[in-house]
Image: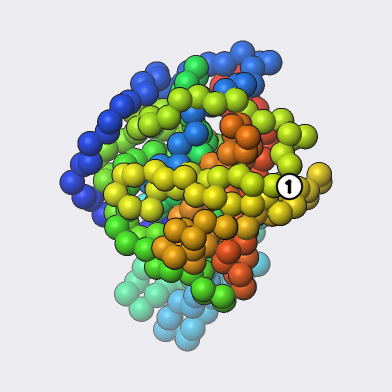
Amino acid sequence: MGHMSFSAAKKAVASIAILLTLTSPAGAKVKPDYLPTELIPSGMMVGISVKSDGVLVVSLGEVETKAGMVSPAAEAGILTGDVIKNVGSNEIKSIDDFKKAIKNCNGDKVSVRVERDGRTLQFAVKPAMNAAGNYEMGVWLRDGIAGMGTMTFIDPKTGVFGLLGHPVSDVDTKAQVPLRSGILIEATVGSIIKGRSGMPGQIQGSLNMENVLGKLYANTNCGVFGIAERVAVKARPIPVASENEIKVGEAVILSNLSGNSVEEYKIYISRVYSDNGERSMLITVTDDRLLTKTGGIIQGMSGSPIIQNGKLVGAVTHVLVNDPTKGYGISIGKMLEKAYMTELSMAA
């Protein structure tokens, strides 16, 4: 399972001191053939707040009418995990947009455009009037999400940063959230729930929504990427490893498990995959301090940089639920390809 601590709740806490800041203008441009050869490894816990491109159907329900219970959306073929993009001629960017569009239908059948697994589909839905006289489709929706995870890297030349190594997904549907906009925000680690077999642990903390550190531009299967405005920097740039430089053997990860302190922990790269999608390596936690504190890899450690032989080789992405001492990592090369290919395509 991927592990970023997410919820719809947003908590504010007192601002913590940033020891050193990296400043870069939003929308920094890079050359089409540019990929960094050095990056600053982070390991810092950060928060993100994402607004979805459209509204996500979290669950389907029934509408209580005078004639009984009906399910307009379900009967039309809409499914949990669909992203509603249009209702009639109305573009839907928020739950408020959706409510206004349904109200304006006056109970008439309307075309609803959704995105599902990369496909665009159209459904004809007839809203039902509930007992209070309001029209409904029988859907529970979400248009944003907030949570915490670990920053992997910052490019000191462009201000591009990457975190997680996997996408931000909805907590209920597990569907990847289509990004409309998003911000990087300050986070503070509070407590640790230790992991055990069959029960992944978790880093708990708080988000400071008032302290925006950067802007997000992509939510991809290889991580979340953005441009830094003010991001804590506590390390010097190190070389980026190529795919063929990742070897079975000892390595370390950087993780933030208390306050704003990033520490180094020993791991062992048990296996390197040449072609296994976003899973580039199997890792085993060998550091007694980390095992004592967390039991291994826990939710919130997604994005923890993996360093081997002085080079940044990738990031922690998943934990094996039945053995939290083991997990998967993604190569830094795969993260960078998504980071810069996506930015360039969006800037065009």
Q: Amino acid at mark 1?
A: Val
Tell me if 41 is positioned left or right of 276 in this view.
left
Locate residue 48: give its quadrant.
Answer: top left
Q: Secondary structure at mark 1?
A: loop
Q: Give the residue furthest to the right.
A: 275
> 42 or 220: which is nearer to us?
42
Give the x, y percent position of residue 46. Answer: 38, 44
Q: Give residue 241's position: percent from left, percent from top.
A: 67, 31
Return the residue at label 1.
248
Q: How many marks?
A: 1
Furthest residue toward top: 31
The single residue placed furthest to the bottom in the displayed view is 68
Q: In which quadrant will I find the C terminus?
A: top right
**Residue 174 sits in quarter:** bottom right
The quarter of the image holding the N terminus is bottom right
Res. 153 visible in picture: yes
Left or right of 24 on screen, residue 222? right
Query: Residue 346, can we see it?
Result: no
Residue at image position (52%, 56%) is 287
The spot of residue 158 in percent (x, y) is 50, 19
Judge by depth and name the residue closer to the eye, 273 or 309: 309
**Above/below status of 333 relative to 170:** above
Q: Nearer the viewer, residue 25 or 19?
A: 19
Between residues 163 and 117, which one lies in front from this camera angle?
163
Label 1 neighbour load within 10 Å: few <14, some 14-19, many 20+ = some
The structure residue drawn at horizontal position 62% and vertical position 61%, both measured from the top left corner, is 326
Q: Residue at x 54, y 26 (%)?
A: 238
x then y, percent, for residue 136:
44, 67
**Residue at x 63% of width, y 35% of height:** 309
Q: Is residue 42 above or below residue 74?
A: above
